[in-house]
Amino acid sequence: MRPRLRRLLLLAVATDAAATPVDGAWTTRCLHCRSRLLLASTGEPLGHATLEHVVPQAWFGRAAAAPLVARVGTADDARNLALACRRCNHDKGKGPDERGPADARAFAVVAALLDRRLARWREPPAA
């Protein structure tokens, strides 16, 4: 696994108020379905955990996504990162991500996910 991906996974879990450290790993819930996810303290996903860009990376720079992008700043901002199970992350990629921000339903789904992510927000630990 690439070091950059590990850093982003650790940033996502460190800023997730639902995440708790347990025996050298982190446990949290999928942003979508709430299934239990594990992430090693090294950033290695255990099981089906994947990195979720809540506002899809492809939506950045698109006018229809501007209200959502304004809430997170950049694609890799901690507010835009979450853990999701592989199935949910893949399904989102085939649905809302693919339809784009101009689709009202896709926009609403991503906005609701962003609200859920921000409700689970905690400040990152001091470096």
Image: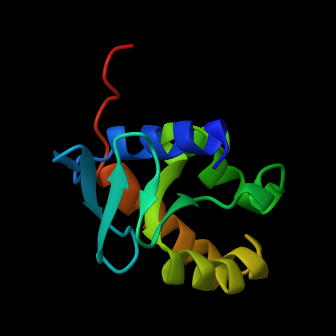
**Residue at figure coordinates x 76%, y 74% from the top left:** 100
**Residue at figure coordinates x 83%, y 49% from the top left:** 61
Q: In the displayed structure, does residue 28 sit left or right of residue 56?
A: left
Count all numbered tags in the image, as a single digit. Answer: 0
Furthest toward the top, the residue is 127
Q: Position of residue 18 (x, y in %)?
A: 22, 54
- Displayed quadrant of residue 3: top right
Q: In the displayed structure, does residue 40 sit left or right of residue 111?
A: left
Q: Position of residue 107 (x, y in %)?
A: 62, 72
Q: Position of residue 58 (x, y in %)?
A: 79, 60
**Residue at figure coordinates x 32%, y 61% from the top left:** 38
50 and 125: which is toward the camera:
50
- Residue 67: tell me if it is visible: yes
Height in image: 49 above or below 70? below
- Residue 15: tell me if it is visible: no
Height in image: 68 above or below 6? below
Identify the colour scheme used. rainbow
Height in image: 19 above or below 34? above
Q: Looking at the rendering, in which quadrant would you find the C terminus?
A: top left
29 and 7: which is toward the camera:
7
- Displayed quadrant of residue 56: bottom right
Q: In the displayed structure, does residue 107 sit left or right of residue 81?
A: right
**Residue at figure coordinates x 60%, y 54% from the top left:** 68
Q: Position of residue 96 (x, y in %)?
A: 66, 80
Q: In the displayed structure, does residue 61 sit left or right of residue 10?
A: right
Height in image: 78 above or below 65? above
- Displayed quadrant of residue 2: top right
